[in-house]
Image (cartoon, helix red, strand yellow):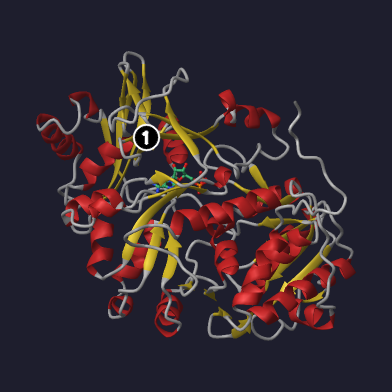
Amino acid sequence: MDLTIPRTESADPYPLLIKQLLHTPLVWAPGQEIVYRDKVRLTYRTFRERVGRLASALASLGVQPGDTVAVMDWDSHRYLEAYFAVPMMGAVLHHINVRLSPEQVLYTMNHAGDKAVLVHSDFVPLIAALRSRLNTVSHLVLMTDDTQPAELPVPFEGEYEDLLSKADPDYEFPDLDENTRATIFYTTGTTGLPKGVYFSHRQLVLHTLGLIAGLSTSPLHCRVHSGDVYMPLTPMFHAHAWGMPYMMTLLGVKQVYPGRYEPAMLGRLLATEGVTFSHCVPTILQMLVASPAVKQLDLTKWKVVIGGAALTTTLAKAALDLGIDVITGYGMSETCPLLSLSHMTADMADWPEEEQIRVRTSTGRPVPLVDLQLWDLDGHVLPNDGQSRGEIVTRAPWLTQGYFKNPEASEGLWRGGYLHTGDLATQDERGYLKIVDRLKDVIKTGGEWISSLDLEEIIISHPAVAEVAVIGIPDPKWGERPAAFVVPAPGREEELTEALVQQHVATAAEQGIIPRYGIPDRVLIVEELPKTSVGKLDKKKLRQQMQS
Ligand code: ADP
């Protein structure tokens, strides 16, 4: 018997659309504030009007459903307006990663087929340099914080505020198909050219609900609610700022957008706006907890989710000592991004601090609706025993269905019906994951796997080492052997030698912390390590360096 519910003419199927996220906040909290630095304060009511005006303004420039509209901005109320207005009118929002190299930005804009671009004045020189090679762009809109620059090197259609002031707030947003593409952005390209990932209205709405389910149901701590004050510290151009702006808007929360991340401004906003919830990569939290100005603030109401890279025990401890409720989140561009969060469960309330930190710094448990497994290289599911190491593979309602215009890479991503993260992890009986390495970084030596992260952790524990990166180098006998790049700690340049590092790892091997074959064959003392556009270690560059 076919149980499919037929469409009836009078009933509404209610497609899951981004515009539906705006119903309740405008009823619950129309007077709630959205703040931009020390420059702009809007209410949700005005924000909603401006979303309508932005759509009308774009339409009057000639933007139509199906077109792609790109944004080059720091975190702002304007970016939030584009998060809603562009997809709601049936166009696709391209979040340009402004930290990519100019050539990569050009590649992504041509690849995505951007038609209109909203450009913050900081990026006018960049857009001017690329303009003649942008194949699909026909409209540029300028966004300024202050007065418009007197001279512009390329023609703009107008200034954002000016266009909005002339536009109609009552744009009629259509009932789209919920599977309409809403957003596109590009991976940071540690391997080859940046790859485009894309998400539909339905996926973003479900991701928003998944975030709420993951973040607001913890029995103990780090719980998000409508009384929070939100400030992102992961850029809005990177993986939808982890989807938080959509969630916070749905909850009618006060939102604070800091523009370009400058420590003094961040500290000021944290204090004056009473921020209670943020998310960032470890390096930003590290910078903040080391800042004397920030340390003086009362941070006991601040909840922070760390992601993008592992939260170390040292950083977690430093944050907790300041009263910050810190946990880990895990995901990647391909996954919208949220997959897991490391909240503690009720029974952990009276665990010793050290044990609690172990949970907070784990890679967390999958959030509701995420089907997550560990697979070995042959695709067998591994047990949740806290020991077995396998690749994290996943299915969830909000994963990219492929790489944009790249069927070959899409096939690889979705081998065996699960999205392959390329992350190697363990999962314990309680469901907590622990990433041990990226599959491409793990060192395969003599049929065994050595985690480059484990080795790095041992090497960095020597006080003469400031920074370290470990990679596998090809070896005719063992397949691969570990090689370490180390940066000396200031003042200890003389002391740091290859033999010292090898001896340090050998001591760890004697204590059973790492196998003996983990002692690096080569140790290179360097002045600095290459980083990617988002500040992660660029091991691809190190591998190239070893080959040349
Ligand atoms: P890119 O893949 O270009 O570095 P992403 O932001 O998509 O950009 O990075 C996702 C990757 O970052 C994950 O696959 C994982 O390796 C790493 N990552 C993200 N969150 C965590 C975390 N909490 N702990 C450890 N690694 C993480």
* Image point (53%, 73%), residue name: 253
Callout 1 secondary element: strand
Quadrant containing the C terminus in the rendered view: top left
Out of 220 and 439, give the one closest to the viewer: 220
* Image point (21%, 29%), residue name: 519
Which image quadrant is residue 208 in? Answer: bottom right
* Image point (73%, 37%), residue name: 405
Out of 242 and 287, give the one closest to the viewer: 242
Residue 452 relative to residue 13: left or right: left
Which image quadrant is residue 486 in? Answer: top left
Out of 189 and 548, give the one closest to the viewer: 189
- Specify few, some or many for label 1: CA neighbours under 10 Å numbering under 14, 14-19, or 20 or more: many
Q: Is residue 465 among the parts visible in the rendering? A: no
Using the image, determine if residue 286 lies above or below residue 422. Answer: below
Q: Is residue 436 among the parts visible in the rendering? A: yes
Out of 527 and 477, give the one closest to the viewer: 477
* Relative image position of residue 166 (x, y in whole percent): 84, 82
